[in-house]
């Protein structure tokens, strides 16, 4: 049965490759174990895993469409792209790479996530990731996430236990713009627009205040600019960010920390910037 | 052309890889917690209070499920179809455990808490602060308190401390007010408003 399926799918792809028309892949609970290049439209149903020996290069303008399936009935779509090998998604400003929902009326958590787990290479540049549970999750690897847009997700960008640079991105209209558990991460989060989310930054737990989160715009988030999780008892310092104001009381009013729950740590916001950050200048401007 | 060739080769490799097997389903969306309700307005508000509090403070996904009554929601809890719901002490003692009514509120709470823990692996957390007079069986008060599966509390060690922040915060007047609000807006909005006003989220 599976052999028949493979042959059928191969037959469908051959003319596309030979004629030079826009290629299209439809992957259902598949594994990738070789070097592949994706372009055109790639549809994913279920879990597609890029194994350790696999390497996926996604070309500018490619559209990755996750079909909405909820096999376990938890209200969260089960289609996902899990990367244990390498994934290099380098779009351009003119032709970004799109990760999106295949639903007729898309909504947050239609699909699960783009998930890097012990990945060998993790590069996202000029991508748009939308309508997922997490626009991207990165764990136990080195990663760069740059010049991208994460919108209409539960978590825009989420990481723990990583070496990561998150720069020049827009995290907008998510439940949490950025969600992280530091857990020994070497993280530099700078020159990002984190706005119009319910929560700008959610520091869930295990932060020892080592992550650098500076030169970001943290404005117009509906409930809080920054929130500490129930188990985050140590202070978190976010220097040199633009909060929409330099007034300490106004900044504090947008933060859930020890001022609201005495068992939590404090969020410290030294040296607030006096104006918005131009996020496109992340290559030129040094992060303090 | 080079890209197309690479694409084709890649596609072929991928297609061959398809035959190897189905990958695991991975975690880190985390388990979705399910909170039960007997479907009354009061129960829906209480379930949403728990749901919004947990989701907001821990980032865990939470769902609310309605059941036809106390026996049904209790059965779902025992079967691990749900993780918690708000029960009333008198109902737990008389209708669920089929034991004698106890008139003293503190003694009743202690009694149901002990039996639920020992016999059912269910934990009664701090009473919320009001009693449901309509659902109280003869001879026993019906103090509302969250009942949670013990294994859920083990998986989420901060959960008991978080839920107990609601302990004693909802008196008779408050629950009446919340129910009135729920006539004009969805229970989750009522719950969110209360939690925000009380600086719990």
Image (cartoon, rainbow, N blue to C red):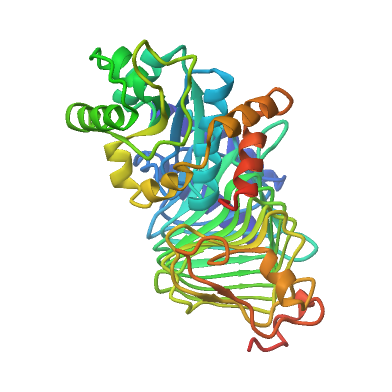
Q: Is residue A252 above or below residue B121?
A: below
Relative horizontal placement of residue A240, taking residue B80 as reference (left or right): right
- Count of number-bearing discs: 0
Residue at position x 65%, y 48% from top? Answer: B197
Q: What residue lies at 68% left-to-right and 63% top-to-bottom?
A: A254
Give A64 or B187, whichever is nearer the viewer.
Answer: B187
Residue A79 pos. (x, y %): 52, 39
Q: Residue furthest front?
A: B104
Tell me what residue is drawn at x 24 percent, y 14 percent.
B100
Name the side, left or right, on which A188 lies relative to B131. right
A84 and A212: which one is in front?
A212
Q: Position of residue B156 (x, y in %)?
A: 35, 48
Residue B41 image position (x, y, % from top left): 59, 21
Q: Is residue A217 visible?
A: no
Quadrant of res A84: bottom left
A233 relative to A218 in the view: left or right: left
Residue B143's image quarter?
top left
- Give coordinates of residue A220: x percent, y percent: 77, 60
């Amino acid at each position: 049965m599976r052999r028949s399926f493979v042959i059928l799918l191969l037959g469908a792809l051959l003319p596309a490759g030979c004629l030079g028309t826009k290629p299209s892949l439809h992957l259902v609970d598949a594994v990738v174990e070789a070097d592949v290049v994706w372009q055109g439209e790639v549809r994913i149903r279920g879990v597609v895993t890029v194994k350790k020996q696999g390497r996926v290069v996604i070309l500018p303008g490619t559209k990755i469409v996750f079909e909405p399936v909820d096999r376990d009935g938890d209200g969260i779509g089960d289609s996902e792209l899990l990367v244990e090998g390498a994934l290099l998604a380098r779009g351009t400003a003119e032709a970004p790479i799109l990760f999106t929902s295949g639903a007729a009326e898309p909504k947050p958590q239609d699909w699960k996530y783009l998930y890097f787990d012990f990945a060998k290479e993790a590069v996202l540049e000029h991508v748009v990731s939308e309508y997922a549970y997490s626009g991207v999750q990165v764990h136990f690897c080195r990663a760069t996430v740059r010049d991208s847009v994460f919108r209409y997700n539960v978590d825009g960008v989420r990481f723990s236990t990583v070496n990561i640079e998150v720069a020049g991105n827009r995290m907008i209209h998510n439940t949490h713009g950025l969600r992280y558990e530091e857990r020994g991460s070497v993280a530099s989060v700078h020159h990002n627009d984190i706005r119009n989310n319910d929560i700008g930054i959610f520091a869930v737990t295990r932060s020892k205040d080592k992550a650098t989160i500076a030169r970001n715009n943290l404005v117009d988030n509906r409930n809080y600019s920054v929130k500490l999780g129930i188990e985050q008892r140590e202070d978190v310092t976010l220097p040199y960010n633009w909060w929409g104001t330099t007034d300490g009381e106004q900044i504090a009013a947008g933060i859930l920390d020890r001022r609201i729950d005495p068992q939590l740590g404090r969020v410290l916001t030294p040296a607030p910037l006096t104006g918005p950050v131009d996020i496109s200048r992340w290559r030129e401007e040094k992060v303090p | 052309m080079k890209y197309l060739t690479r694409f084709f080769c890649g596609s072929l490799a991928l297609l061959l890889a398809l035959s190897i097997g189905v990958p695991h389903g991975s975690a880190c969306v985390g388990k979705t917690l399910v909170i039960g309700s007997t479907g009354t307005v009061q129960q829906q508000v209480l379930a949403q209070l728990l749901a919004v509090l947990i989701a907001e403070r821990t980032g865990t996904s939470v769902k609310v499920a309605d059941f036809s009554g106390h026996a049904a929601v209790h059965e779902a809890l025992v079967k691990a179809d749900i993780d918690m719901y708000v029960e009333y002490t008198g109902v737990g003692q008389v209708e669920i455990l089929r034991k004698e009514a106890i008139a003293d509120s503190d003694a009743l709470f202690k009694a149901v808490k002990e039996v639920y823990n020992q016999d059912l692996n269910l934990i009664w957390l701090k009473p919320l602060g009001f009693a449901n007079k309509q659902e109280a069986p003869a001879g026993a008060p019906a103090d509302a308190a969250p009942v949670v599966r013990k294994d859920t509390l083990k998986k989420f060690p901060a959960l008991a401390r978080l839920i107990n922040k609601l302990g004693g915060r909802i008196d008779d007047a408050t629950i009446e007010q919340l129910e009135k609000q729920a006539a004009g807006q969805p229970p989750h909005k009522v719950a969110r408003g209360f939690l925000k006003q009380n600086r719990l989220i």
